[in-house]
Amino acid sequence: MSDDARKRLFGPEDVEPLDEAARLLDPEGALEDEVLGAGLRPRRFDEYVGQERVVENLRIAIDAAQRRDEPLEHVLFYGPPGLGKTTLAALIAREMGASIRPTSGPTLDKPKDLVGVLTSLEHGDVLFIDEMHRLGRVVEEFLYPAMEDFQIDFIVDRGAYARTLKLPLKRFTLVGATTRAGMLSAPLRDRFGIVHHLDYYEVADLERIVARSAAILEIPIDSEGCAAIAARSRGTPRIANRLLRRVRDYAQVRGDGRINADLALEALAREGVDERGLDRLDRAFLRALVEQYHGGPAGIAAIAATLTEDAETLEDVVEPFLLKSGYIVRTAAGRKATELGRAAIGAAGASGSKQQRLL
């Protein structure tokens, strides 16, 4: 894509930082979140902020399972990334007094990979599988008897001599997480006894999360600073913690280490995050939809090709927030920009000069 085209889509201030490693919402940044964010995760349900209905229902189910002295039923969490699915899985294991064995769909490439994991589980252990929608069909079918009957079925020989051997397993709890529940097969979904959807957080809850994380990281911050970061966190705790770390860096280098509203806004503007929480790729998505495709409808593959971006990244990371916030709508013919989305592009362009001055 030419520089002029990139400037039209991403804005003049955003052409240079197009490197995805610098994006706040880059999926590759999840590694940073896992390493630096692990210490910020709640250790008990009492410390967990937000998702009150989900947490309350989980606590009831856990209490009931403990009274019956049996493992918790299998649990499925689905929703956009960064909302706490992994954290909830760890809390379930902690509350049940069990060990957790984390893995992910892409790593379970062959049935023997899954067999090795299942046979190593002790009674009551929690097996956490992230990105369950990326499990292969053959591996998924191995899960069915393991989830229902706590056994693995092996087929030995072929034809008239074929027979099935059953390998018993210790009772365990499978906690699955996915950002695409629709890609899970119906037989797999039906084997989960507890299913919860995690939705975006309210700003008030994000303020509490930012304040808690700042206290753990020993970052001096006032309530206005917490509010400024929370309002631009796209309803996502992971992003809130990431923005907090970036603002902390700016406060230590360009300030006295303390975070207030003015300093937070200046730091976030430098990171390319506007007052709506939209980052560079969000604005590029909207600008492509409005300017290149005249507001739509346009298919996600076409938008991804225009942005030279992966379509799955747009669907998993960018679209959910734009849909939730009313900037775009999804129709049978493709994505369409709303009036709010068109206005956001105008607002982004107007604020671009201010960000350029800060840079």
Image (cartoon, rainbow, N blue to C red):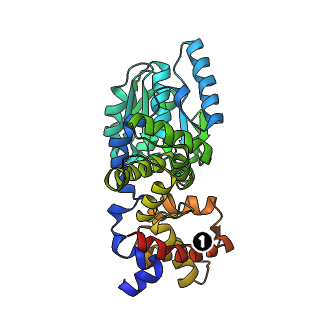
- Residue placed under numbered mark 1 in the picture: 344
The vertical placement of 339 against 173, above or below, is below
The vertical placement of 255 against 307, above or below, is above
User: Does residue 333 appear left or right of residue 9 in this picture?
Assistant: right
- Along the line of sight, which residue is nearer the eye, 319 or 248? 248
Task: Give the quadrant of the C terminus.
Answer: bottom left
Q: Which residue is the extreme one toward the right?
A: 339
Q: Which residue is the extreme one toward the front?
A: 256
User: Does residue 156 appear left or right of residue 64 in this picture?
Assistant: left
**Is residue 188 visible in this depiction of the protein?**
no
Q: Quadrant of residue 223?
A: top right
- Amino acid on which the number 1 mark rests in the picture: Ala
Query: In percent of the image, x 42 and y 80: which residue is there?
Result: 12
Task: Give the quadrant of the N terminus.
Answer: bottom left
Residue 318 is situated, as x and y percent measured from the top left of the image, at 51, 62
Residue 65 is situated, as x and y percent measured from the top left of the image, at 58, 18
The vertical placement of 56 against 352, above or below, is above
The vertical placement of 314 against 207, above or below, is below
**Is residue 218 visible in this depiction of the protein?**
yes
Query: In percent of the image, x 54 and y 53: which residue is there?
Result: 228
User: Does residue 64 appear left or right of residue 96 in this picture?
Assistant: right
Residue 7 is situated, as x and y percent measured from the top left of the image, at 42, 82
- Along the line of sight, which residue is nearer the eye, 157 or 106? 106
Q: Which element type, helix, strand or loop, lies under badge 1?
A: helix
Q: Quadrant of residue 217?
A: top left
Residue 284 is situated, as x and y percent measured from the top left of the image, at 48, 73
